[in-house]
Image: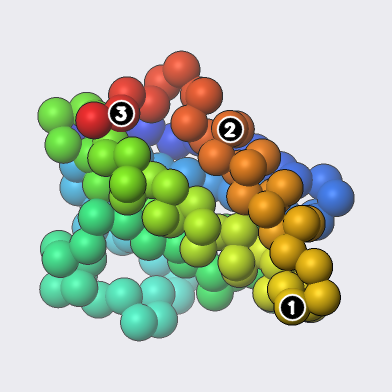
Amino acid sequence: MYNMKIEFKIKIYNIKIILYVSDNLITVADKIKKKHKVKLYKLSNKEIKKIDGCVIGQFMENDNLLYVLIQSKNGKVCVNTLTHEIYHLTSKIMKHNDFDFYHSDEPFARLNAFLNEKIIKNKKIKLI
């Protein structure tokens, strides 16, 4: 089984991000459930089997923590899936910080670019 974990913090937003790349997202989700002793809302094992990635934001309010789960195939990640989930990650962080997208989208764009660079340039991730 292929598994990789990347952790980092974004100090300006006081958020910790844990990204898992795995060929078995159910195992990763079960690990998160066990660690936090909770059920992941809106994310049953049946649903996990159908997805290529997701952002779990239910721990943001109390723990300032976001999980990103990305499905791998033969140890590689689809760049479309990865950038799609990074967009959701950006949205959750900005919403959590009461960002007003309609006033100016520049902070959103800068954070999205930072996250894409931070994650995609990680030498462990191999893209399809």
The type of colouring in the image is rainbow
Q: CA distance from mark 1 to mark 3?
A: 33 Å
Which residue is denoted by mark 2 in the rendering? 117
41 is higher (above) or lower (below) than 17: below
Q: Is residue 119 left or right of residue 109?
A: left
State which tag comes first along the sequence, 2 or 1. Answer: 1
Q: Secondary structure at mark 2?
A: helix
Which residue appears farthest toward the bottom when viewing the image? 42
Q: In the rendered image, which quarter contains the N terminus?
A: top left
Which residue appears farthest toward the right when viewing the image? 12
Asked if residue 112 can be seen in this view, the reply is yes
Q: CA distance from mark 2 to mark 1?
A: 24 Å
Give the residue type at disc 2: Glu
* Disc 2 to disc 1: CB gap under 8 Å: no
State which mark lies toward you, 1 or 3: 1
Q: Secondary structure at mark 3?
A: loop
Q: In the rendered image, which quarter contains the C terminus?
A: top left
Which residue is denoted by mark 3 in the rendering? 127
Which is nearer the eye, 57 or 29?
57
Q: Is residue 7 left or right of residue 108?
A: left
The disc placed on residue 102 is 1
State which mark lies toward you, 2 or 1: 1
19 is higher (above) or lower (below) than 40: above
Please give the name of the residue rendered at 32% of the width and 47% of the height, measured from the top-left corner.
Answer: 80
Residue 120 location (% of width, % of height): 48, 31
Give the residue type at disc 1: Tyr
